[in-house]
Structure formats: C-alpha cells, structure tokens
Amino acid sequence: MLTITNLSVGYGAITALQDVNLEVKQGQIVSIIGANGAGKSTLLNTIAGLVRPRQGSLLFMGSELPRQPHLVVKRGIVQVPEGRKVFSGLTVKENLLMGGYLRNSQEITRNMEHIFTLFPVLKERANQYAGTLSGGEQQMLAVGRGLMSNPQVMLFDEPSLGLAPLVVTTIFAIIKRIRAEGVTVLLVEQNARKALSLCDYAYVLENGRITMAGQGRDLLADPSIRNAYLGEQVECKVGN
C-alpha cells in the first residue's frame, strides 16, 4: 500500500534519513521504533508532505505521493502529530470540522457521529475549548480529527507521549479498533514494548537508517532489542 525506496532527507548539512526502505501493507499496523533523534518523526513528516526528501521514492497505491500536505490528505493519508497540536482556541466540534474540510456535509455528520461513539468524552465536551481538555482528551481529539477525513492510512507520531498509563491503554485499544475498521496504521512510538506488541511488522531506525526489520513478536523477543529499547539486560550466550 505504501512503499518507500532509497529515501534520504536532510536539514542543511545534517542528514536525518539515509537510504530508508520500508513497506506498509494494506490492513497492517507497522511500527517504527528507535531512540530520540533517530529520524522517526522526520520519516512521518516526509510521508505527510511536510518535509521534502533529497532523494528517493514514496509510492502510495502504486503512484508517487504529492509533496503538498493537503494533497496527501486528499489521497488518503493523515498524520496524528506528536504533541497533539489541537487548535486550543477552537471548540472540540470546531477541531473536528477542521479535520473534515475535504469531506461533504453528509460525510462530516456521519464521521462525527462515529467519532463521538469512539470517544464519548468528546461528545460531552463538544462545545468546550480544546485548550481546556486534559492531555488524554486532546490526544483523543487529535485522533478524531484525523478520522474526519476518511483516511486509508493513519500516521501516529508518539501517541502515548506524556499520557497516564490508563489513557495509553485506551489510545492503543482505539488504534487496534481503527485497524479493525479497515484503516492501515504506521506508528512511531517511544514505548517500544507497546508498539511491538501491537504491530504486525516493525522497523528499527537508528541514526537515520533502518537497521532491523521483522514481525513485531520476533523483534520483541530479540535480545538486542530488549537490551536497547525495553530496558532489559539479556545475556547473550556465544557457542564454542
């Protein structure tokens, strides 16, 4: 569904991504894990059209992705950004309407009803300013805003960042439900254990390069991953 080939991205003299190759198949949850500064957010921002690559190809359903963010959304890819980035001076309902700006009135009504089913608290706070919501409620709003455009693919950038454990569990349950409803997910997440437990396939990004890839459960069991990202000291035995 989404194929990235030999992607390189830089900021001035700094190279953020180098020869990145990855694939996201339809109906999957694919996770990207890595340390801070590895290039994870840059990768999502490049897919979303917010950052221009130096080289490489980004194909969606066999066609090159446009470089303008609104056209990427129109093609069916939506990003839920790191830090939520809700419009704090607008109400919950107005934030959702912003997410549905490419849809017609019938779709907007239907989508908003669905989002209020997913997140009942947003229905309760529909006329409340987004800036007065808790962090978890703002994250729910950011997810709902993304769903308003009827995406085929959702890009999640650190959805658990700064949230209480109970809220994190809720957010990840919603991501699973979104996938069950037919939306493909590309997830960047600091909580490697959660990300690998949830996903079908995962990539490890280190210093702008993909260094490992495999099914989530396989990477979760890999000693080097457990040492580096799960905080577990695993003794690796070397045969004679």
Image (cartoon, rainbow, N blue to C red):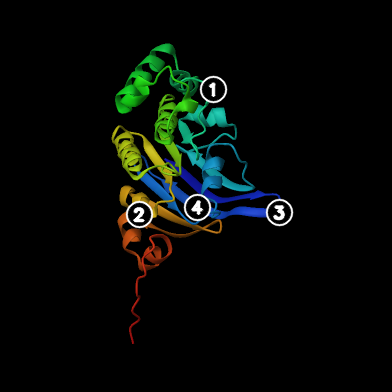
| Residue lying farthest to the top in this orientation | 105
Mark 1 and mark 3 lie on one chain; the one further toward the N terminus is 3
Q: CA distance from mark 2 to mark 1?
A: 35 Å
Q: Nearer the viewer, mark 4 or mark 1?
A: 1
Marks 4/2 in contact by CB < 8 Å: the verdict is no
**Residue in the picture at 36% in, 40% down:** 26
Mark 2 and mark 1 lie on one chain; the one further toward the N terminus is 1
Question: Callout 2: few (<14), some (14-19), or many (20+) C-alpha neighbours within 10 Å?
Answer: some
The answer to whether residue 102 is visible is no
Q: Which residue is mark 1?
A: 89
Q: Amino acid at mark 4?
A: Asn
Q: Amino acid at mark 2?
A: Arg
Quadrant housing the N terminus: top left
Q: Nearer the viewer, mark 2 or mark 1?
A: 1
Q: CA distance from mark 1 to mark 3?
A: 37 Å
* Residue 158, image quadrant: top left
Q: Secondary structure at mark 4?
A: strand
Q: Which residue is mark 4?
A: 21
| Front one among 237 and 180 | 237
Image x and y of residue 207, in percent = 55, 59
**In the displayed structure, does residue 182 sit left or right of residue 155?**
left
Q: Secondary structure at mark 3?
A: loop
Q: Which residue is mark 3?
A: 13
Marks 4/1 in contact by CB < 8 Å: the verdict is no
Mark 3 and mark 4 lie on one chain; the one further toward the N terminus is 3
Mark 2 and mark 3 lie on one chain; the one further toward the N terminus is 3
| Residue lying farthest to the right in this orientation | 13
Image x and y of residue 67, in percent = 59, 35
